[in-house]
Image (tube, rainbow, N blue to C red):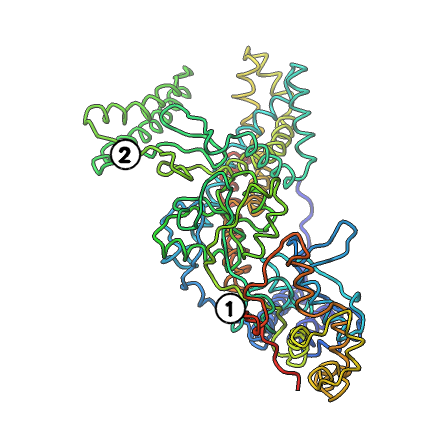
Amino acid sequence: MAEAAKPVPRPARRFGNVALQAAFVVAVGGLAYAAIVNAAQNLAHENIASGFGFWNNTAGFDISQTLIDYSSSTSTFGRAFWVGLLNTLLVAAIGIVLATVLGFVVGIARLSRNWLVAKLAGGYVELIRNVPLLLQLLFWYNAVLKTLPELHGSMTLPAGSFLNNRGLFLPRPEFPPSFRVVLLALLIGVVAAIVLRLWARRRRDRTGVPVPVVWPALALIIGLPLVVTLLTDVPIRFSYPQLGRFNIMGGIEILPELVALLVALTIYTAAFIAEVVRAGILAVPHGQTEAAQALGLRPRSTLRLVVVPQAMRVIVPPLTSQYLNLIKNSSLAVAIGYPDLVQVFAGSVLNITGQAVEVIAVTMAVYLVISLATSLLMNLYGYSVAVVER
Amino acid sequence: MKRIATTLATTVGLALLLACGTQAALSQTLKAVQDRGQLICGANGTLAGFGLPDPQGNWTGFDVDFCRAIAAAVLNDPTKVKFVPLTAANRFTALQSGEVDVLSRNTTWTMSRDTSLGVDFAAVNFYDGQGFMVRKSLKVNSALELNDAAVCVQQGTTTELNLADYFRANNMSLKTVTFATADEAVKAYDTSRCDSYTTDSSGLYGERLRLTDPSAHIVLPEIISKEPLSPAVRQGDDAWEDIVRWTHYAMLNAEELGVNQKNVDDMLKSDAPDIRRLLGVEGQFGQGMGLSNDWAYRIIKAVGNYGESFERNVGQGSPLKIARGLNALWTKGGLQYGLPVR
């Protein structure tokens, strides 16, 4: 096992390595600096405005979906940047959750012993993986829009909602200040559910008796705030969407562009995640499954308790890549008019200010930060499920 | 040691090369065009009447004619033009970076574009204004009735800004739906995703032809902004800017003097001093721009005068049927005023 110790490298060669690396870093840094200086000089020579002074200028244009307050007359380009960024994060977050769920389901389905289920899952993966995302996005956008009725033929849904090709309009709840009590109850419910889960796991490890956790946890998270609401009689008002002359005003509006983008991104990324999950499951040694079955575990429990936890350490790195792909692919929102960061900032703001270099640099930096943060979180999770070796 | 030295030398050499700065030779556009033998013109590509290739790939339009006029003046051949379709998003970067020699793409001349983009505008060849198009079935007769309407618009245009200003000034609320290209905005309007489509009035007439049922839509009477459309060139090349500017004024002067594509050869024999100066029979006006003296003769022979180009592309001789209106000659009550060639 232990081989003869390698001779210590001679000092001269080690010094040469360090010197080479230092020189390379200096050269690359010099290149980057020279590139920036060159760009600044050329911009000045061409009388093109440069710098970030535009950040505080009034934007002047409207955005169709804003999660924070925004007004075309008073908001700045900086504010428009934040609006676009929040829209991107919204799509990315929901897309990642939905794609993961769908991807896991399809990936496991593909390994099912049921021939039809396996073939359907396989067909889905092969079809979706091989059609470009932009085409799929345009398909969903046109399919989503064309099938929905026009404004005057809106479908009325329960609870005063409307569905038409302008979007899904839901009643907007207006919370009075006394609602804070209910939010507090929700927080307590969530914390209690987490504590319950930890206690249940410890009890199971100690005594071997599994403690049901799912339904009690749900009861705590949903039931506790509900009980508090009923007891304290907090009045929640709803503002209902009204069908006006041109449009539906009031209520919460969910844009069809958002839905089309989410559907396309979810279905596309789920196909790739399904393959990653399938690879992870196949990577678990078959001996584990056999041992679990020998112990009398049913196939579903084997999957849930033995195979998938071990598969996770193989799944997490390529899964991170798929998440990053989803976040970057969300920039295709430009093609259908969803106001994400690229559309609002690298589209409208770039055009109105004309400062392409600064705007594109900021957009690239933002995507870099989001991607690095995501991969950092995923790596942390990966370390927690990694095999602990001696 | 040798490996270190060679790697160091290569990387430092590359860094120095970049540090020298790529001083692009953008100030000699005329020379570049003549050497290349072709004018590269930034055009629209999707706007009927202004810049649109037909199914055979031949480009036609008001802005297209203007580029052909420049090519006739500079290269003596109106067909030696390469048209590069540009969107509102990349038109200025294409011009700034040298990808096109001139931008002839229904672009509005505004102060911020003139002063902070590093481009110059040559001359207003089309006075336009922003308008709205709605379906007749909405029974709307004025833009002031569009409170709470959803309006489709192309991003990165003065249209976007004017729209927000107009609705705010009239205390109306608005839902904007922005798209990257005019194509998508028009398609969304066609499928009733929004109630109204807004762009320059001339563009509205052009885009209306592309809808599934052009007769079901009307253009509202309000013109809510000034949109002086002008071809643009890079800053720093005054000689090239002069050529582009005087191409427009040559076409205007020709219309004022009654010189058109059919009679320009006969007009060479005219005694009128204005016509003789314009067509280069007298005077040395072309040389100041680096062209031969019959530069204006070539322009008119190739594309005709301003009125002919207007009528052929956007006026009564075209499906758009836009009236001369503000674009009539100054002698007929319009704003087009040909600066004197003398």
Which residue appears at 34% of the width and 24% of the height? A196
Residue B213 visible to the viewer: yes
Up the image or down, A352 lies above or below A115; here it is: below
Q: Residue furthest top?
A: A296
Could you tell whether A69 is left or right of B335 in the image? left
Chain for numbered disc 1? B
| Quadrant in which the N terminus of chain A is drawn | top right
Which residue appears at 56% of the width and 52% of the height? B204
Chain for numbered disc 2? A
Amino acid on which the number 2 mark rests in the picture: Leu
The local secondary structure at tag 1 comes to: loop
Amino acid on which the number 1 mark rests in the picture: Thr
Q: Which residue is mark 2?
A: A183
Q: Label for residue B110? A: 1
Instruction: Name the residue nearer the viewer: B2 or B91.
Output: B91
Could you tell whether A256 is left or right of A135 in the image? left
The local secondary structure at tag 2 comes to: helix
Question: Residue A2 in the image: x percent, y percent?
Answer: 66, 42
Tell if the residue under mark 2 belongs to the same chain as the one under mark 1: no
Q: Which image quarter: residue B213?
A: top right
Q: Which image quarter: residue A161?
A: top left
